[in-house]
Amino acid sequence: MRKLYRGVAVGLPILIQEGTDMNKFAKTIAGLFVVIGPKSDRPLEAERICSALIQKLLEDPSRKLDPGTWQNAVQMVPSQVESAIISQTLNRTIPVGDLPGALASICVGVVGGGHAPNLTKPVTSYLSEHGEPTAFNCLVLDQTDTAEVHVSLTCQNVKEGHSGDFSIASTQLSASLALSNKRTQTIITKVFSSFDTPGDEPFYLRIFT
C-alpha cells in the first residue's frame, strides 16, 4: 500500500511507501526532491523543472517510487549536457542504525559544491525517524550558479546480508543544463514556464544559498 506521509521530526518532506517485507529492520521506500539555489523573486529554472518532474511522477501512483520511472522522467529534461549514468554496488558492514547515514552520504556525495553538510544531516535524521529504508530515490537540482542547473539523481536499493553486512546497489544519473546557451534557455522556457515553484509537498526540500 502506498501513501503520502508528512514527517514532523525535522520538517523534511519525503514520500513513503509502506513495504510488505517482513524484514524487521527495513520496511520503507522513500523518494525526495531537493532544489538548491538563491532566493529569487520568480521561480528558478530548477524549481520549475522539479515541479514538472513531480507532477510527471505522480501521474501514475502505482509507479511513482519505481527507480526506472524516476530515471526516465529525468532523462526527459531537454538539452542535457555532460549526461552520465554510473551504476555500482557497495558492500558495507555497519550497524543497522547507521544505514540512513550511509544512504544519505551516497546521495549527496555526487552533488558537489560544498552542499554535503547541509544535506547529509537532515536526510539522515529524517530517514532514521521512519525506519531503515529498503530503497531511496533522491533527485537534487542545484542552481547555485544561476547560469547552470546541475541535476543529480541517485536510486538506491538495500539488501541485508549476515552479521551487519548490507549491499547497497546505487544508480546515479547526472547532467548539467547550461542556461547561458540561448537555445537551451529557450527550450526550458518553452517547456517549463507554465510550472510554478513546488508547493508544500511532503517530499520536497528547498535549500537556500
Image: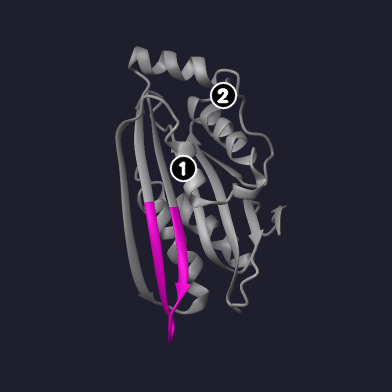
Which of labels 1 and 2 is toward the front? 1
Task: Check disc 1 and give the amino acid type.
Answer: Val
Residue 26: which quarter of the image? Answer: bottom right
Q: Which residue is mark 1?
A: 140
* Residue 40 seen in the current view: yes
Query: Is residue 13 among what the camera can see?
Result: no
Please give the range of residues in magenta. Answer: 155-171
- Helix, strand or loop status at disc 2: loop
Residue 90 rendering spot, x and y as whole percentages:
34, 67
Q: Position of residue 114 (x, y in %)?
A: 36, 46
In the rendered image of this protein, does residue 178 appear above or below residue 168?
above
Is 28 or 107 nearer to us in this picture? Answer: 28
Q: CA distance from mark 1 to mark 2?
A: 16 Å
Q: Does dot 1 land on a helix, a strand or a loop? A: strand
The amino acid sitting under disc 2 is: Pro
The reply to whether the magenta stretch includes residue 165 is yes
**Front residue of 89 and 197:** 89
Quarter of the picture containing the N terminus is bottom right
Instruction: Give x and y (percent) for residue 149.
Output: 40, 30
At 41% across and 59% down in the image, what residue appears? 105
Front in this rendered view, residue 197 or 145: 197
Question: Magenta part mainly helix, strand or loop?
Answer: strand
Q: Are marks 1 and 2 in contact (CB under 8 Å)?
A: no
Residue 45 % position (x, y): 49, 25
N-terminal-most mark, 1 or 2: 2
**Residue in view at x 50 percent, y 77 percent:** 96
Q: Read off the residue under disc 2.
A: 43
- Checking the image for residue 114, the label placed there is none
Is residue 108 in the magenta section? no
